[in-house]
Image: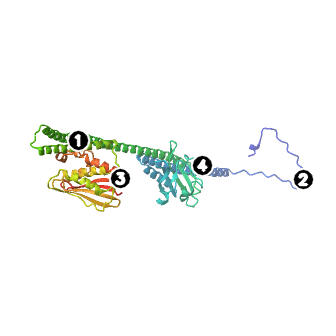
Amino acid sequence: MTSSNQSSGPKPIPPPIKASSGPKQVPAVPSPRPQGAELLAELMQTQRQLTQAMHETRDLRAKLGRRSHQMQVLQHVSEILAATSKGGQVVSVVLDVLAQEFHCQRAVVWALEDGGSGYVPREGTGLPRAEWSALRLPAPNPFPETPLVLFQSQWLDPACGGETLQALRDGEGQQLYFVPFEHQLLLLGFAILAMPGDRRLEEEDLDSIGILQRQTAISLYNAWLFRDLSEQRDALQRQALELERVNDALREADQLKSEFLALTSHELRTPLTGILGFTRLVMDGLYDDAEEMRSMLQDSYTSGQHLLGLLNDILDLAKIESGKLEVHPEPFSLAILLEEVKPIAEAYPRRADVELFWPDMEGIPEVVVDPSRLKQVLLNLLSNALKFTKEGTVAVQVERHPGSITLLVVDTGIGVSHEAQTRLFQKFAQAEGGHSREFGGTGLGLVISKHMMEMMGGTISLTSEGLGKGSTLRITMPIA
């Protein structure tokens, strides 16, 4: 101990000792420190260091465990998100992860709706569905009253969201954490988590949220692209089907027109041949007396009237297709019109076993029609009914309804199949063969009548129970 206090320099001169009358005092010499005390102090210091290291190791292990767990969860979530192309599934998975990993009492996830006009709540937890589904927010800024960096996760101010987000806070001092899902500067959606007021997010929590944000944003964007592509694919399929339908209709129309031209040529040639034949017989004097000559001229005139009717139908159809057909509706008496139609219809050719009946028009009010056009329609219906009825009756009936009058032409003729009823008012419908070949006609009468009735504010329809069961044609007109 004394050797440690020696130095190599000159020794100091001690002060002189004063004389004293009392006993001489001996200075105290410090006792040497035991070596065991130093070891004990070193051991205690080492123990404190080890304890601190153990605490730090435990904290690091806990952080590592949480981090490992979060990485496993994120990997599992990324696998799920990569396997789905539906935005609803993406939102549901993200909400479950946020609620479970960060122990949120309440949470809601919003997504940008298709039109981009607002954010719609897609999934929620901790609240009844009726409550969270009503929390719609505007776009592009869901919180227009509060300055906010929308693409950055952050704690929301108490005033942010106002009354809309009050259900999430629930008056318990909850603070709201905003988690945006942004991709290419587009806020595709976001989540708002309700947490206790003293909750703080650690660095690894923020890292996990950041990773989840990016994965969710990409998945939502992919889901949006997939939905858009699906809609385009469906639209193309619909267009392809529509084009195929149009092509079928065009092919059918082309076939019908070809048959129509062949049939019309025959229909026009028949009366023209009759006119020329009877005229040649009269010109050559090949008749016995004046009565036979008159009969030949009458047959020629009848053939000419038939030919004129066919040409008028073709001209009317051309006017309809070009939009030049005109009607002039006015109040008119149905009783007068039927009186004008009756002698013409009675003169139409019909089989001997077919009777024609007319209604009692007493008390029937006037209707708003074009008299000449309605007369043309009614004569067309009666001509068809008489032509397609081999035996039985053809009856004209009248019904009065609120605001309208309906004329019915009811026959006991060959009827119309259910399949043919769907196309009967189409152009050249009779040109498909069958009865059109047996009974003649161009198939234009009904389609012309339909257009005329519609232009006069009325309707025309046909009902039949099937082949051989007759048919009923109805024309409805507004009361004047």
Nearest the eye: 374 or 449: 374
Which of disc 2 and disc 3 is earlier in sequence? 2
Residue lying furthest front: 290
Q: Earlier in the sequence, mark 4 or mark 1?
A: 4
For marks 1 and 3, give the CA distance. 35 Å
Amino acid carrying label 2: it is Ser
Question: Could you say which quadrant of the image residue 397 lies in?
Answer: bottom left
Q: Which residue is mark 4?
A: 147
Query: Nearer the viewer's eye, disc 2 or disc 1?
Result: 1
Task: State the separation of the CA atoms marked 4 and 1.
Answer: 74 Å
Q: Residue at x 43, y 51 (%)?
A: 88
Structural distance between the alpha carbons of marks 4 and 2: 90 Å
Mark 2, Cα crowd under 10 Å, few <14 / some 14-19 / many 20+, is: few
Q: Which residue is mark 3?
A: 330
Q: Residue at x 31, y 49 (%)?
A: 452
122, 106: nearer the viewer = 122
Judge whether residue 13 can be spotted in this image. Answer: yes
The residue nearer to you, when weighing 202 against 478, is 478
Q: SS class of the residue under badge 2? A: loop
Is the Cβ of the residue at disc 1 closer than 8 Å to that at disc 3? no
Amino acid type, mark 1:
Phe
- Which residue position is annotated with label 2? 20
Please state which of the two labelled residues, at mark 4 or mark 3, is closer to the viewer. 3
Amino acid type at image mark 4:
Pro
Q: Pointers 3 and 2 in contact (CB under 8 A)?
A: no
